[in-house]
Image (spheres, rainbow, N blue to C red):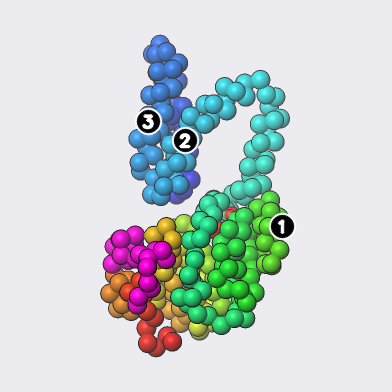
Amino acid sequence: MVWPLPAFVAWALGWAAFFGLRALAAPAALALVLATLLGGLLATTGSTPWRRVFIGAGFPLSFAASSSGAGLPAWAWLVALALLALVYPAGAWRDAPIYPTPRGALAGLGRSLALPDRMVVLDAGCGLGDALVELRREFAGASLRGVERSWPLRLLCAWRCRFADVRRADMWAVDWSDVDLVYLFQRPESMPRAAEKAMRELRPGAWLASLEFEAPSLRPMRAFACADGRPLWLYRAPFEPASSPLPCPALNHARRCPCSSLPGPSAPAPTPSRNCAPLASST
Ligand SMILES: C[S@@+](CC[C@H](N)C(=O)[O-])C[C@H]1O[C@@H](n2cnc3c(N)ncnc32)[C@H](O)[C@@H]1O
C-alpha cells in the first residue's frame, strides 16, 4: 500500500474495533485499550520508526482529540484541517513529511568530501532547514539553496536560514543542472525518481547525497557514517548502475548493516575504512 494509506487503514481499524467492542457492551476503557493495542500491533508493519509512530499513535490521538473537542464547532475542525493541508500539501505526502536531519548528523562530511569552496548545494525538500544548517557548517563557502513544497515550512525555513536561498517549489520541477550537490532526506519510494532526475540533470562531477535511503538503481560512490550511525549514501555523476562492482568492500557491509559497519564521527581516528574511499577514477 502506498504511504500514508497503511496509517489511514490502521486508524480506521482502531475506530472499527472500538465501536465493535462498545456494540458488544464492552466498557469504554477496555475498548479504548484493546483498540490502541491493535494499533500498536499494526504499527510493527511500518517500514521506518517514524511510520510506526504515525500508525500506532493515530487512533489514541484521534480519540483524545474527538473527546476533548466534542464541544468545538464544525468550522474549528475545518480550520484545523485547512492548516494541516497548508503545512502538508497533498503532493508532499508522496515523498516525506517533515522529519528533520538530526543535529550534528553531517559532522565531518565537509572534511570527508573535500569539495571546492564555491559550489552550489541544494536541499531538495528542505523542511525547517535543519539540513541546511548542517550543510552550511560543513561547506562554509558554498552557495546554499532550499526548495520546499509547503508554504508555512518554506517561510519558517527562509526566516531561520537567512544564509540560504529558500524557495517554495516542487523539488521534482526544479532544475538540478547547475547544482554541485543535491541533498535528500525523503522516503525509500522517492529514490528511484530522484535517481532518474539526477541521471538526467546532474552534470559530471556533481553529487547526489541521500540520508538513510539508497537509490536502488545506482552504485554508491561512498557511504558516509552519520553521527547516529545512519548512512549518507553518496553518488557521483556520471552515475553507474547498481549492478557494477562497489568501489570498496566496506560499502557491501554498509548495505547489509550500516550501523555496525560504519562507525560514527565520534570514532577516535578516521581511517580509510571509516568512510569508503572514492574510486581512483573519481578523484
Ligand atoms: C524528511 S523532511 C526533510 C527536511 C530537511 N531536508 C532535513 O533533512 O532537515 C522532507 C521534507 O520534504 C518536503 N517535501 C516532500 N515532497 C516535496 C516535494 N515534492 N517538493 C518539495 N518539498 C517536498 C516535505 O514537506 C518535508 O518538509
Image quarter for ligand 1: bottom right
Disc 2 to disc 1: CB gap under 8 Å: no
What range of the chain is rendered magenta?
253-272
Marks 2 and 1, how far apart in space?
31 Å
Identify residue for label 1.
159
Specify the quadrant that holds the C terminus: bottom left
Identify residue for label 2.
57
Q: Is residue 99 above or below residue 190?
A: above
Query: Which of 75 and 159 lies nearest the eye of the viewer?
Result: 159
Q: Residues within 10 Å of mark 2 (few under 14, many from 20)?
A: some
Instruction: Mark yes or no: residue 193 visible.
Output: no
Q: Residue at x 48, y 45 (%)?
A: 4
For the stretch drawn in magenta, the main secondary structure is loop
Marks 3 and 2, how far apart in space?
11 Å
Instruction: State which tag comes first along the sequence, 2 or 1.
Output: 2
Label 2 is placed on what type of residue?
Ala
Measured as percent of width and height from the top left, residue 217 is found at 39, 70
Measured as percent of width and height from the top left, residue 256 is found at 29, 62
Measured as percent of width and height from the top left, residue 87 is found at 64, 47
Marks 1 and 3, how far apart in space?
42 Å
Q: Is residue 120 above or below residue 4?
A: below
Instruction: State which tag comes first along the sequence, 1 or 3.
Output: 3
Using the image, tell me which numbered label, if any, was put on residue 38: 3
Q: Residue at x 46, y 62 (%)?
A: 211
Which mark is nearer the camera, 1 or 3? 1
Q: Residues within 10 Å of mark 1 (few under 14, many from 20)?
A: some
Which mark is nearer the camera, 2 or 1? 1
Measured as percent of width and height from the top left, residue 251 is found at 32, 71
Label 1 is placed on what type of residue?
Trp
Label 3 is placed on what type of residue?
Leu
Drawn side of residue 37 relative to residue 83, left or right: left
Q: Secondary structure at mark 1?
A: helix
